[in-house]
Image (spheres, rainbow, N blue to C red):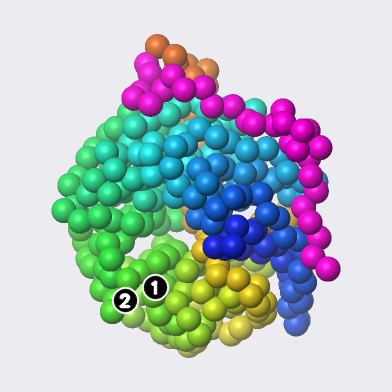
Amino acid sequence: MEVLGGCYEQILFGFSIQPAENWEVAPDFTHHAHSASLSAVAVNERYVVTGSKDETIQIYDMKKKVEHGALVHHNGTVTCLEFYGNGHLLSGSEDGLICIWNTKKWECLKSIKAHKGHVTSLSIHPSGKLALSVGTDRTLRTWNLVEGRSAFIKNIKQNAHLVKWSPSGEIYVVAIANKIDIYDLETASISGTIATEKRISSIKFITDSILAIAGDEEFIRLFDCKSQKCLCEFKAHENRIKALYNFKMEGLHILVTASSDGYIKAWNLDIDKIKNAPSLLCEVNTKARLTCLAVWLKKDFETEQIPDEATPSSSHVHEAEQLSLKKKKTCWTDSNKPSEGDGQKATLKRKSRNMQKKKKLQRLK
């Protein structure tokens, strides 16, 4: 498994972790491909992509440990990235666009003018049929990915900066400053609200009903989405927490955290004893100001990512196979129905000398 951390210093760190009785973490690589701070990172089975304030998306082939190219469609900071399985990537930016990329040929299949302001966050439904986005135009938008159009627009009166589907897709949450509104999918109405003292920086579903929340402080809190009660609170770092990532491996619920204190830590959550503070498995000091986090999982481990970066679970496989995303008649390849923002041809930038050489990721000494 490879833990990946992006930072203000324009570097992507890679640390190899060997799960064992005593978890071992070792520096693997550093890569300085961006000319500005990193703002987002996402993974699938083969690739890692990073977004930056330099307006580019860099692609890394983790199986070969080489650069794969850069995507240069956006005109603004790339604020969010999310894979759907191994075939598609969605990206959002300060230019208000959401782009859908085919990850086989790395082509921009669709460019949607999603928000009048910045796109601050997006999340794909586990079925792959819907997506949510929030932006600085104070709207929450639902996207029909089958037809490639806006399905619903909700005015939320404030700028939301995070949105996330639950693993089952039955609920979703929206973070605005220091509070989280919990929405029910069937009614599209708020079923509950969770408030914290500090601004919220990252949210992750541990299970369908347990939500991990981190913010501009040293603590992580686990909440029950049904009762909105805090189940557990523990001090994870010495400074504000910037990012969370979680997955299941060999029956364990692993929560990975990154902080402005430079540390990346992995924790073991005992769901049966959720009120107890989790145990620390391992930690590493990057000595950098971290901004984003992801974990690339090798196939040889029995793993399940939760919830949004995951390959669709078995319950969604049949449904996902029916998605128009994979059919030629879909909106993503239908040139007869362009969205605002289409017409700019975005291609994988690989023809420069540097890209032809496919630089290997720099090994840490």
- What are the residue bounds of the magenta stretch? 337-365
For this orientation, the residue located farthest to the front is 35
Disc 1, SS:
strand
Q: Is residue 325 above or below residue 65?
A: above
Amino acid carrying mark 1 in the image:
Gly
Residue 113 % position (x, y) = 34, 32
For image coordinates 44% across by 14% down, the residue present is 335
Residue 5, percent from left and from top: 61, 63
Determine if residue 129 is in view. no
Q: Which residue is mark 2?
A: 198
Residue 185 percent across, percent down from the top left: 28, 49
SS for dot 2: loop
Who comes first in sequence, dot 2 or dot 1? 2
221 or 343: nearer the viewer: 343
Q: Quadrant of residue 350?
A: top right
Which numbered disc covers residue 215? 1
At x 38%, y 51%, the residue is 121
| In the foreground, 285 or 322 | 285
Q: Name the main secondary structure of what is drawn in magenta.
A: loop
Q: Residue at x 52, y 46 (%)?
A: 54
- Marks 2/1 in contact by CB < 8 Å: the verdict is yes
**Which of the 4 image quadrants contains residue 266?**
bottom right
Task: Give the Cα separation between the discs numbered 2 and 1.
Answer: 6 Å
